[in-house]
Structure formats: structure tokens, C-alpha cells
Amino acid sequence: MNEQIQTVNPLVTALKARLPGETFRLPSQGLFYTNGELSEDVKDGEVHVFPLTALDEILLKTPDKLMSGTAITEVFSRCVPQIKKPMELLSKDVDYLLMCLRLISYGETVDVVYTHDCEGAKERTYSVELRPLVAKTRPIDPTTIGTNYTLTLPSNQVVILRPPVYGSVLNLYLTSFEMQRMSSEEQFKVGQEQLLSIVADTISTVDGYSDRNMIREWIRELPAGWLDQISTATQAFSTWGPSSAWTTTCKDCGKEITIEIPLNPIAFFS
């Protein structure tokens, strides 16, 4: 029997040896992951990130792959292999990792086209430094989880909240896009279900129950005021995570301006 001889490509071996990547700590510090979202060797939310390959770049620029979740799933499997369930990662952790991927794959800066609202302003290109943005990412405060993420309603039911996961946010974007082609009546019905999903996706458990269908049915029966209490409590989610705001000087008027970096992968990696 002839044995098939497998040869090792020395070019690929040398390339991988020279692309060590960097280690970054997720802003969530991994505190919400209890269902195998991260590999067992991850400590305190620290994961190793490797640079994008040419294939990864193509995936991140393909709208269909992005909207289906295939792009993030495949890219993270190669570039952040310690992430086992990318679609179940918190949305802010995904935003942070995309910034880290851009940093180690393309360098310290990213060019952003921006037009200030000052008189006579023109479309300008600004070079934004990524390393400071990554450094000033606010980690979640673990001491607040027991208070900011726990809500007791007038019914004495205890609601444990959670930040939205990437898969839920992606589904929200997809549904919003599809609604543009619907009739007004269809938009109203889908909009109601979308609102229900948004609230349900920020609830981890109610009185210890985590079944998503049970929680959705429970939300339908909630008094409007109690639903507002849940929505207000979720505002605590905005106090941590990466910042996409870069402060610089307008090239036209010289005043200080703040530019928001688009974390949309298509814009961010183009």
C-alpha cells in the first residue's frame, strides 16, 4: 500500500510563527459566560487574538455572510479560537474584539472620512489612533452585577438582567432591514414582536426560570409600568464597553470635534 506523503509548506509555517497576535481582556471579563461560550483555559476574560487572513477580510466585507452570522463565526474560529460560541458573546465584547482585530491586522490607525458642521467644511480624512481607544475601554464592574442586573418587581418576582448578546443584536438589524419591504400593517405586527424580543433578550431569568418562551409569554402579561422599570434598569448596560469616539481638531475651523468610528465590519475593515 502506497502511503500518501503529506508535505509541510515552510512558507505557511514561517508565516504563522511570525504572527503571534496579542492578548486582550474582554470588557465583560467573561463574567456572564457559563454555557461554554469561552474555552476552559480562558481566565478573567483574557483571550488571544491573531491577525486576520485574506479570507477573513473577504468574509467581513460580505454583507450576506455578516447578516447570517457566518462571517463572525468563521473569523473568530480562526482569529480568536478561545471563543467557542461567537453568536452568544455579548455584543459589546464582539465590538471590542473587532477593534482589536483591526489594530493587530492593519496597524495602529484607521482612516475615517468625516465632514464637520462648521461653515465651509469639506469632506476630510482623519487618522484615528486605535491603541488609545482599546486602552480606554471600560471593563464591567463586577461589584455592580448583584445590584444593577437584579430587579425586584412589585409582584416580588426577581428579574436577573443581562447585556444583549451579539446574535440578538444581529437579528434585530436583520429584522429592521426586512421591515422596510413590508406593508404598514405587517410592520406594526413585526415591530411588536421585535420589541418583545428586545426586552426578552435582556432578561436572563425570572424567579430562576430561563426558558425563553416562558419569559416572552410573561412579558406579554406585564403591566406597562413594570415593563418600563425593566427598560430603565437596562440603561446600566451602557456604562461599560469599548468607546468608538475619537477627539481631534477640525481641519477646517480648528475647533475640537468628536468622530464616531463605525464598528460595522464592512465599514471598519474596508
Image (cartoon, rainbow, N blue to C red):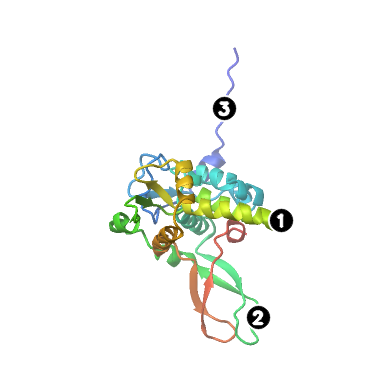
Q: In which quarter of the image is residue 265?
A: bottom right
**Whole-Å distance between the Cαs marked 1 and 3?**
58 Å
- Left/right placement of residue 191 relative to residue 49 reads right
Q: Which of marks 2 and 1 is nearer the N terminus?
A: 2
Q: Which label was assigned to residue 183?
A: 1
- Left/right placement of residue 206 relative to residue 130 reads left
Name the one closer to the observer, 41 or 103: 41
Q: Which amino acid does label 1 sit on?
A: Ser
Name the one closer to the observer, 227 or 11: 227
Give the residue drawn at x 48%, y 46%: 216
User: Judging from the image, what secondary structure is the residue with disc 1 in?
Assistant: loop
**Badge 1 local density, few (<14 within 10 Å), some, or many (20+)?**
few
User: Judging from the image, what secondary structure is the residue with disc 2 in?
Assistant: loop
Q: Quadrant of residue 134?
A: bottom left
Q: Residue furthest left?
A: 143
Q: Which label was assigned to residue 122?
A: 2
Q: In this view, does 66 lie above or below 137?
A: above
Q: Earlier in the sequence, mark 1 or mark 3?
A: 3
Q: Is residue 250 above or below residue 174?
A: below
- Left/right placement of residue 15 relative to residue 122 reads left
Q: Which amino acid does label 3 sit on?
A: Gln
Q: Which label was assigned to residue 6?
A: 3
- Mark nearer the viewer, 2 or 1: 1
Name the one closer to the observer, 244 or 234: 234
User: Looking at the rendering, in which quadrant would you find the N terminus?
Assistant: top right
The answer to whether residue 69 is seen in the rendering is yes
- Residue 205 in percent (x, y) is at 38, 46
**Badge 3 local density, few (<14 within 10 Å), some, or many (20+)?**
few
**Whole-Å distance between the Cαs marked 2 and 1?**
39 Å
- Residue 270 in percent (x, y) is at 62, 59
- Mark nearer the viewer, 2 or 3: 2
